[in-house]
Image: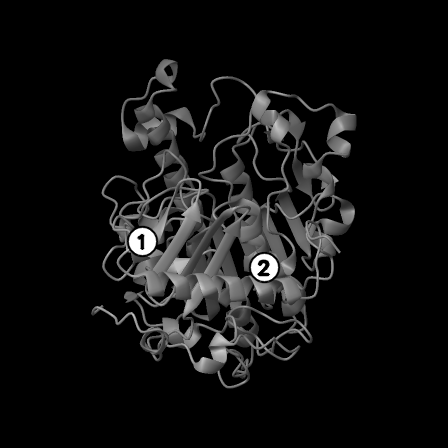
Amino acid sequence: MPEISLNRRDFIKKMGLSAAAMTIPGCTSSETAVLGTPYGEHSAFAKKPAGNKPPNILLIVSDDQGYNDLGCYGSGEVKTPNLDRLAAGGVRLTNFYVTWPACTPSRGSLLTGRYPQRNGTYDMYRNYLVDFDHLYTTDEYAVSPEMILGMDTREVLIPRMLKKAGYTSGIFGKWDLGQLHRFLPLQRGFDEFYGFTNTGIDYWTHERYGVHSMRRGNKLTTEDKGTYATDLFRREALRFIKKHKDKPFFCYVPFNAPHGASNLNRPRPGVQAPLEYIRRHYGEYDPKNANTKRAKRMRYMAAVTYMDEAIGRMLDLLDELGLADNTIVIFFSDNGGSGTADNGPLRGNKGDMFEGGIRVPAICRWPGAIPAATICNEFLTSMEIFPMLSSAAGLGPPKGVPLDGFDMTAVLAGRQKSSRKEMFWQRRSNKAARVGDFKWVESSRGSGLFDLSKDIGEQNDLSKQKPEVLATVKARFEAWKKLMAEAQPRRPFRNF
């Protein structure tokens, strides 16, 4: 990108922002917006005819997977032949963001198409005393934040929206949006659920810091205790696809892999994988040295490859049932990879406002709509998924619900540029904003202004060289904050 003038008007023009957008008009109930850029019927929801049968949807989310931890993203270490196959049949996204650098708010935005600050889930539902080895009693856990917090029940989630088009929806894996009855998946539009409702479990015992967490439907179950979690989520997803093959389905598979296990024992076990599987795919492994950096990395890679095999089986089943040509398959990680992951060439990890915490690997395959073996470098986010799926099902936006994304199908197909020009993040006092190619970070782990077109690793702080650019990006962030504050209030964190 050429050097830009420090003149504010030129900067705004260069970033593709209109003067009207700079004033941030409020969103009406019929709008979907990327901060002041209205996405009406001409772009976000140019309503598509669904045809004889709307496309099936298989949405797969990994947990804490590194940006570089797929073969198709350049890894020569992690084996992901099935995700590589998925990319070969569709598009690989290199410039794709989530809305928060950790689990819960990221997943909330995926399912609502809205910023965490708009849908009310802008922090974790988590018990922090476990960090100090506290084992919650049954009574303590029943009234703890992890148990009683949940996404506002007024929010419209993808499965509830798709039900209008005749879809049957199932979720198999990590929910993370509330554990009280009214917050559980079956009350939020899903027809089937098998998985866990909090933010992390042991892969075999299915406990979170000593609390059993696996559910079928609304009820806790120990029926599969002792079975590796990835096997269970694969089994349930395959069963669901077979059962509902004759009508449109939405199959959401949010794996817990490769997230670290949630146990109190010291040292923490980190990512878990079957011993013989580790040895078969990644060489000699001694459990006695499980706490070394190399051993942790081997377990992480094995968990990714095991998940990749499960995904491969789902892709195979779509082929076997003749469904692949009419199924949208989307894969991405819920946030950046943690300490054992490889986020290269990005700076930072899970929890960071730097690219390594919020830019993630993503793949989409949709035969007939998206060309195979392509790469999309356009600026896109997980908030584009809700309107994309709604449009694919022949639906418009939910009535009276302002969205923060747009239908990205034409962008993925290479027919048009992304209309997203900016994106904003906040995790407590940590902040970030991207406007055009410029990214501003202000956080406990570092701050600065970076030109991502030249510096994807965020190494060269331009704050002093480009003070007017910095001021403009900060002003955009403050305008976004005002817009979020004026949105209809949502629980659980907002004071109203």
Q: Amino acid at mark 2?
A: Leu
Residue designated by label 1: 84
Asked if residue 4 lies left or right of residue 67, the reply is: left
Q: Which image quadrant is residue 17 in?
A: bottom left
Residue 303 location (% of width, % of height): 41, 36
Q: Residue at x 29, y 55 (%)?
A: 464
Instruction: Answer few, some or many: residues within 10 Å of disc 1's Cα (few below 14, many 20 plus, some between 14 and 19).
Output: many
Residue designated by label 2: 111
Q: Which image quadrant is residue 233 in?
A: top right
Asked if residue 159 lies left or right of residue 347, the reply is: right
Which residue is more in the foreground, 24 or 81? 24
Q: Is residue 86 among what the camera can see?
A: yes
Q: Amino acid at mark 1?
A: Asp
> In the figure, 139 relative to 478: above or below?
above
Instruction: Answer few, some or many: residues within 10 Å of disc 2's Cα (few below 14, many 20 plus, some between 14 and 19).
Output: some
Q: Is residue 242 among what the camera can see?
A: no
Residue 431 location (% of width, % of height): 47, 51
For the view shown, which residue lies furthest in the top direction?
A: 288
